[in-house]
Amino acid sequence: MKEERMSSQAEHFGLLGDKIPRLIMRLAIPSIIGLSINALQQFVNAIFVGRLGPQAIAAVSITLPIIILLSAVGQGIGVGTASFVSRNLGAGNSSEASRGASLALALAAPIGVALTLVLLFSLRDALALFGASPTIMPAALDYASTLLFGYTFMLLNIVSGFIVRAEGNTRFSMWTMIMAFTLNALLDPILIFSLDLGVRGAALATLLSLMAATSIYVVYFLKQRGIVRFSPSYITLRGGRIRQIAAVGTPATITGILSAVAFMLLYRAAAPFGDNSIAAVGIASRLLTIGAFPIIGFCIGSQAVLGFSWGAEDFARVQKAATFMLSMAFALSASFSAVVVIFARPIVWLFSDSADVIEIAVSTCIMFHLFFGLFGVQYVVITMLQSFGRSRLSAVVAFARQGYLFVPAILLFPRIWGFKGLLISQAVAELVAGLLAAFVMLKQFRDIKGLVLRRPGHEVKAES
């Protein structure tokens, strides 16, 4: 086996070069573009599906908890691996970074196959649990079952993207996502309308684009285009390595599971008010996802700088990076919130031409995005804590928005105020979660300032 070479500053895509704002934007812009393309892909899919009618929108929307649940597994493995990779590269240990990445990719495939089989045999029951009515169940089954066959590709695609971005090569990830979007956008009208496959055609277009993107990542690793190397000889079930990845990744997975549960409860709460209400909530929820993607992309791109600097114990650089990240993420989330609140009606019209759906969706979109400006603060804090290896505190912040704040609200408020209570639930959870994140953020900045002032070589605890 060839000895793995250690990464140098020049080798690691310049993670210690440039001024902080310039470096972060150089890494984050491709990631922002890449995940914005993902958001645009969802937007385009929703527009095409919307032309099939309110029931098609409701059917696709009702499957969202399943998609989020499946993505959560990939997010957990990816976030944990990205933190592991960037911290080891920062410490100059590229060999250990490669071993962690190889282990993650090796685990992703069997996990994907196992979850696919479990869900395929329980799909109808799952959709019924999520609130699918008899009128939308057939279309929901068509859409979800088709996507499930490509879940292993989705998982490998997510994990590979995190690894490539963690080593600083966000540009490659961006172009891979752009290719996938272009293919999806070309296939959507052909499969949905020309071949008359309906919602199954939309799912098939997504599946084929995922397979193409995964193939590109496979070539990337086989040809060793980055610093991280994939090798079967690196795959060992070493407990310490798995624990490190799981410690940071598990909160991200649980956050995704909570998100799926939150959407399930949201659609179940909307179900008594009819398919039009489910469609309206689906439109508003999709807009929330679209708005979140650029912010997540910015934070994922910036995470390489945070993790690398933390591993190198350059705390002044960590402080500057976190400050810049916070200002940019808040600007993005506040701008998106303002646009949706002000232009809710013309935006909703793009998704549906049903007057009944539009009326419900406009008020839903406004309430859902009223405090979305705080989402940027939440995600920067979560990214900081993940980069530092502070998994427990990361979980406290990550679980708030769609977990222990949202769940009690969505169970209680609709019983008191009906559909208005459903709208209030999302707004209240967003507001309180944002304030909690701001409090934790201030504490982290005080801690980092203290580390900057200490003598070089002071031992830093990885867990708060």
Image: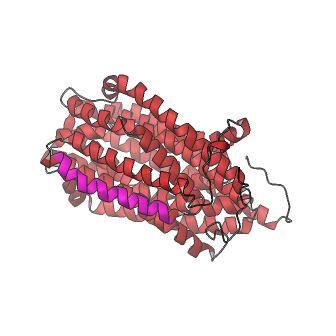
The residue nearer to you, when weighing 363 against 348, is: 348
Q: Which residues are magenta?
A: 171-192
Is 176 magenta? The answer is yes
Q: How many marks?
A: 0
**Horizontal arrangement in the rendering, residue 95 relative to residue 106 (left or right):** right
Q: Nearer the viewer, residue 8 or 233?
A: 233
Q: Position of residue 71 (x, y in %)?
A: 45, 42
Q: Is residue 213 magenta?
A: no
Q: Residue at x 24, y 52 (%)?
A: 187
Image coords of residue 62 (percent x, y): 30, 36
**Residue at the location (30% across, 24% down)?**
124
Please state the horizontal and vertical placement of residue 343, each as a whole percent of the image. Answer: 26, 62
In the image, is residue 364 above or below residue 441?
A: above
SS assignment for the magenta stretch, majority: helix
Q: Who's the residue at 34% across and 50% down the image? A: 209
Q: Position of residue 259 (x, y in %)?
A: 45, 40
Q: In front: 319, or 76?
A: 76
**Would you say residue 362 is visible in this rendering?**
no
Residue 60 makes an appearance in the image: yes
Specify whether 383 is left or right of 349.
right
Q: Which of the 4 quarters of the picture holds residue 131?
A: top left
In front: 238, or 216? 216
